Image (cartoon, rainbow, N blue to C red):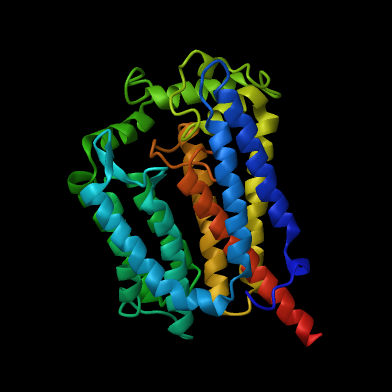
Amino acid sequence: MTNFSWRQIPWGVVFIVIALSAISVINLHSTGIGTDSQVYVTQLIWLAAGSVLMFVVAMIDVRVIRQLIPVFYVTVIIALALVLVIGKEVNGSRRWLDLGFAGFQPSELAKLAVILSLAGWFHRVARPDGYGLSDLLPVALLLGVPMFLVLKEPDLGHTLMLLFIGGTMVIFEKLQRKAFISIVLTALLFAPALWTFVLHDYQKNRILTLLDSDGDKLRTGWHARQARIAVGSGGLLGKGHGSGTQVAGEFLPENHTDFVFAHLSEEHGFVGGSTVLLLYFLLVLAALRAAARARDRFAAGVAIGVGALIFWHVLMNIGMVLNILPVTGVTLPLLSYGGTSALTVMSAIGLLLNIEVRRSMFQSRLS
């Protein structure tokens, strides 16, 4: 944590995080009106702890981070394996380790493990002429192991999230044409096998419901239908804080986690929803800017990975809410209730701050 300068922190990014956190607590407070739910208080505690963690990560020397990547990756893999053996089972899935005082979801940390391990590998193994298929085998292994373990929970949403984050990082690297074409063809050929042998019946039903949202309104189509009603009924300015009928009438399930954006849009309308989307857009833009100005390949890779984490989470969650993507259980960064998710996203943004601070300090020494 040496040679750290608070003046070099990109405070615009910090402001975005504070704004999203404030919106999260206010929105979650509304979901608990009329009940004994105190999720907004717990979320506030997690976000406060995450803020501290964000600045701690920002201060760590990047050389120390690179040295700890193998230890962190192996620890996450062990945690993912333990979930399958001793994890808490909920609705037929094992995704949580019970720590006594709180639940812990290792699949969230797996995103950070993938970002750091892939960025570290591309930093060490440079291919100016482009990466070939044989070069990408270690990448496939680093990405495939956590994906396999998360899929076994089963958790298709987080499995896809790992794939999209890792895939985005690979695409931003220079690939040989043959390697790129082979990856695309393999993905297309694997799709039928994925449908037949990997997806569970309830996951297939969610996809079929997407194609025909009126086909099963009372079961697999219930979540998406009620979310659309909530978003549409909000209009321009919304019904007002605590006045949403979808939550009050208990029509909208998971309104504090997966479908938190639907509740936000119902009470704060198009203006509220658009404001949140704008904040996410600025956050992704900040990540891309950090990647473009990064001092080395490792920093650039991490920045791309963090941007991909935010982008794909927002796209998949809001696409699910608007019924243009299937329901996968992917949360909305910082807005959805969840301690492990909040700490993971805050840590990722801490890495982004770290990259920008080190770059600014380096430039200051040169000038």
Above or below for 301 versus 324: below
The answer to whether residue 218 of the structure is visible from this angle is yes
Question: Is the N terminus in the top left, top right, bottom left or bottom right quadrant?
Answer: bottom right
Residue sitting nearer the eye, 139 or 66: 66
Q: Position of residue 111 (x, y in %)?
A: 43, 58
Residue sitting nearer the eye, 330 or 199: 330
Residue at 37%, 52% in the rendered image:
107
Q: Position of residue 24 (x, y in %)?
A: 61, 37
Q: Residue furthest front?
A: 100
Q: Residue furthest left?
A: 197
Q: Position of residue 40 (x, y in %)?
A: 57, 32
Above or below for 243 versus 197: above
Question: Is the C terminus in the top left, top right, bottom left or bottom right quadrant?
Answer: bottom right
In the rendered structure, the answer to whether residue 293 lies left or right of residue 302 reads right
Residue at 28%, 41% in the rendered image:
88
Q: Position of residue 257 (x, y in %)?
A: 48, 35
In the rendered structure, the answer to whether residue 321 lies left or right of residue 201 reads right
Residue sitting nearer the eye, 118 or 76: 76
Above or below for 338 versus 8: above
> How many tags in the picture?
0
Residue at 35%, 75% in the rendered image:
178
Q: Residue furthest right?
A: 367
The answer to whether residue 191 of the structure is visible from this angle is no
Residue at 33%, 36% in the rendered image:
207
In the rendered structure, the answer to whether residue 356 lies left or right of residue 157 reads right
